[in-house]
Amino acid sequence: MLAMAACQPVQPVERAPESAVEAAPVAVEEAQSAAPAGRYGGTLSVAGMELEIVVELAEGADGYTGAIDIPAQGAMGVPLHSIRIEPPSIHFEMLEGPALAVFDGQIDESGALSGVFRQAGVEGAFSLEPLAETASLPAGVRSVYADPAGRFTAPIPTGWTVREENGFVRFIDPDAAIRMDIVVVEGEDLAQATAEAWRIVDPTFDLPIRETIEPPSMSGVERTWVTNYETNDVRRIVQAVAQLKEGVAYVILLDAELAALQRRNAQVSILGSGFKILAVEETDLRGVEPLPLDETLLTSLEEFIARYMEAFAVPGAVVGVVRGDSLVYAKGFGVADPATGAVMTPETQVMIGSTGKSLTTLLMGTLVDDGLMTWDTPVQQLYPDFRVLDPELSRTITMRNLVCACTGVPRRDLELLFNADRLTAEDVVASLADFEFFTDFGEAFQYSNQMVAAAGYIAGAVAAPNAPDLAAAYAEALRMRVLEPLGMKNTTLSFDEVRARRNFATPHTQMLDGSYAPIDLDVEALLLPIAPAGAHWSTLEDMAQYMVMQLQEGVAPNGRRVVSAQNLKETWKPQIAITNDASYGLGWIVSSYKGVQVISHSGNTLGFTSAFTFLPEKGLGVIVLTNGRATNLFNEGVVSRLLELLFAQPAETQRNLDFYLEQIDKQVQELAAQVGERVDVERVEPHLGRFVNPALGEITLTLVDEELTLDAGDFRTRLRPKFDDKGELQGYIQLDPPLQGAIYKFTTTEDGAPIIVLGEGAIEYTFVRSE
């Protein structure tokens, strides 16, 4: 939520990436084929007034959308409709009924728009020029709001509207289900400033405070104060974040419906992370070269690694640093297998999770090089059986769309874990036919493992058309086009090969008390149905080979070109904003560290975590691999601390990790107090037996000696009662892998039939009694 955007400890700060929207002038001859999408600024002359206006036009699968800003009237992001563009003619409208305003005009040779404006019987003229600065905005950001008093700026996510009110500015999502208000209050007391901000926005606001948190502040900000409120409604989230700078409190107030927040969390993060206090100076390291990796620096790094491995209870880790064409540092820490005492080494095989998505997009790049597809080839041209819920989108979705995280298809990982032993690669591709799109194309970041898996399988079928099935095709194509050319001898999808080599780390899952426990490799095999999205095994040595190829723009360490520089860099191009400081490319996260471009991806499986980060301009790369589930804070902390050391920057990573360790410990203690030891037999008896959900399949609940057990086929787990802060039963919490912490709610339909609900808001699955 917003608090995370305000105090994220180790994510590098990014300069705005390239936009997916071009605003360059379009000649009339070109206008017949080139759509005039982009931002335009100019004037509206009407009734003796000249008003400055900004118009944004965007082209999507269903035609054009647009919005208009009229700052002098406090109108920001007013939606346009009835947009018709038939170059050189252009027509669009805003508002409706008596206030309907109509724009009729022409596109001239320079790409400018001009014409007649009519509203309520009054006629005027408009004149608009393309705004070149559009190219500096991330895809997913409509424009930037600038405070008239010059105190702050904030990005406006695509589709959102902005209204200047009395004493504050309000940002509203397209469904009017999320409201974010920015208020500036004089004073040093952030708790008092937060209360004053609510009084300015809503004098009747009286929600009780549930908790307050003071996280570490980002560089240049003196203090940060986060307040979460008790709404007595699980479907509503209310939060305030206040930041102090030179005696002024900058407060962001969030009031949102949970389902809307789930659908548009990335857009909320864009606004929260992109909010800039103009009094804060930013560091720019673009002209600074990293220091040598000398003994003193490495000693500091290794002390940091040892300290935080212990603090986070990470079983084992291996860390590598690449400079130019060489792996200059590689060292293991901790144990690969606690049963034997085997230590972690650069040769130890681990799973790399979603970092493997970039191997899939690299494979796709080689197919583009060979003319077997383009990034923008419609998927159905390569795999005619491909479908999504919308028939028109089924025809138009491209290979790029499958891996850009920009289509609006959300995560549906539960469907993988509940059905893994029955899913084939073909099933995963077919499952997309009923996937709901949370948002429109290009509107918000949404991460889908099934979409990336489908891309990999279809690319594999193109590269290896004679393979017996999609899984075999992908494995063969990856081996021939990526792994062998790169010399990645110990990177594989085969669990049999891993077992035969006998040098792999034991995966560890994190239990509800924060400790780590070993799990069997068979649990990790649940990820095989989405293999192209993150079921790859590798070693630090192999990943260093891969890193060198990235830094050498497509050339492997042995001198062999694996992919063209053009198509490799295509995977680095931002496609959609994740936050204001980071965008998703094609299998990569594109951000920056104090002005220096950073390309990265992390990966999680059920018992492993990876972080793969490189700075192309500096010829520098860092790899951190662990055999623990969700050790992301540790992995990314190692990367962040190394960059601080190499660029002689202030040591901020340690205080951030210490804060998160405190929060984790607090959460573990709170959870322990909320989980009951025994179930109420009378309460759970109506829910014993078999239940089924169309997407997740069948589960069976049994009760033996007051031990409640859920059997999902692919996994079996104990359930215990989970109570909220007020002692009310919230549901039954899963104690065992792979979904420890998941809460199942036992309830009934209106006619009294027992049902079991997993998830909430926009991501909810209901199990009904199986006949």
Image (cartoon, helix red, strand yellow):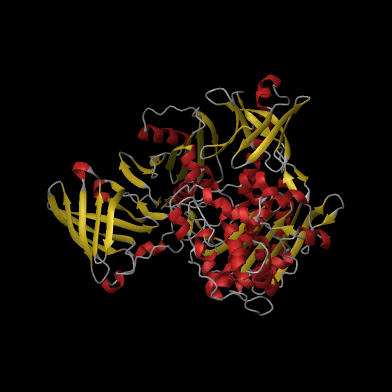
Q: Nearer the viewer, residue 87 or 22?
A: 87
Q: Residue at x 64, y 55 (%)?
A: 530
Q: List x then y, in percent, for residue 497.
A: 79, 62
Horizontal side of 503 relative to 600 (left or right) equals right
Name the residue nearer the viewer: 22 or 205.
22
Q: Name the one closer to the observer, 570 or 665.
A: 570
**Farthest bottom residue in view:** 559
Tell me residue 435's x, y (percent).
Answer: 52, 48
The reply to whether residue 292 is in sight is no
- Residue at 50% x, 60% y is 401
Q: Is residue 51 left or right of residue 334?
A: left
Taking the image as drawn, is residue 465 in sight? yes
Q: Is residue 576 left or right of residue 683?
A: left
Q: Which corner quadrant holds the C terminus?
A: top right
User: In the picture, residue 60 is in which quadrant?
Assistant: bottom left
As drawn, the residue found furthest toward the right would be: 340
Left or right of 518? Residue 178 is left
Q: Is residue 37 above or below residue 170?
A: below
Residue 353 location (% of width, % of height) = 66, 56
